[in-house]
Amino acid sequence: MSEQARYPCYHQRLQEVEGEEEEEEEEEEEEEEEEEEEEEEEEEEEEENTCSYYSNKNSDQEASQALTIMGAMFSIIAVVLACVHLSLIVFRRYVKALPIVAFICSVLSSLSIILGVIVWVGTSHDDYTDVSGDYELGWSFIASAVGGGLVAISAVLFLLGKD
């Protein structure tokens, strides 16, 4: 059985498409000429405004979100390690590396959370000149900064109390 007999609709459609392709090629040539002219004009405009071409208005917000999410992940790891360490102490088994790794994760957590807040405040809100008494900053970011500080304090206390 031939392939054309096996798939008649396919071959019929293939012949139609081949006929359409010839017509489309002529249209595409005309469109390509128009597009080349438009691209040349756009390139001239881009040369004048390269900074606006590469600027991404949401990149600062995305960086802030990424930093705070990384901080949350590091704090989860630190809490899990602290719980494992405390449960091992109950069973009189001591692993010296757990509190140190938990401390490092806590410090990384607090740094990334606070850096996320700084990036958000410093780049997203240029109109804030005095953020010390400004409560329009956003309660979530104030709470994040305080949480980052508390995580750093708890990391130091956990490391000091490991004995």
Image: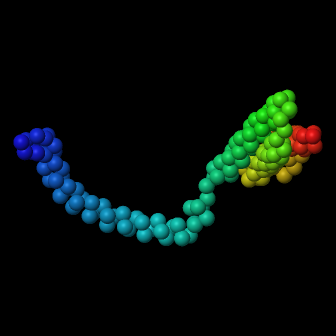
Which residue is rendered at x = 87% and y = 49% of the image? 130
User: What scheme was used to colour the molecule?
Assistant: rainbow
Q: Is residue 132 above or below residue 87?
A: below
Q: Is residue 31 visible?
A: yes
* Residue nearest the observer in this picture, 152 or 160: 160
Q: Is residue 47 left or right of residue 99?
A: left
* Residue nearest the observer in this picture, 20 or 4: 4
Q: Is residue 142 visible?
A: no
Q: Is residue 67 left or right of residue 145?
A: left
As drawn, which residue projects farthest toward the top?
Answer: 90
Location of residue 49 (image quadrant): bottom right
Which residue is rendered at x = 13% and y = 41% of the image? 7
User: How many tags in the picture?
Assistant: 0
Q: Is residue 80 above or below residue 103?
A: above
Q: Is residue 89 above or below residue 110?
A: above
- Residue 84 on image: x %, y %: 78, 34
- Residue 156 on image: x %, y %: 90, 44
Which residue is rendered at x = 22% and y = 56% of the image? 24
Quarter of the picture holding the N terminus: top left
Q: Is residue 103 above or below residue 93?
A: below
As drawn, which residue projects farthest toward the front?
Answer: 92
Quarter of the picture holding the C terminus: top right
- Residue 104 on image: x %, y %: 81, 48
- Residue 28 on image: x %, y %: 27, 60
Which residue is rendered at x = 61% and y = 59% of the image? 55
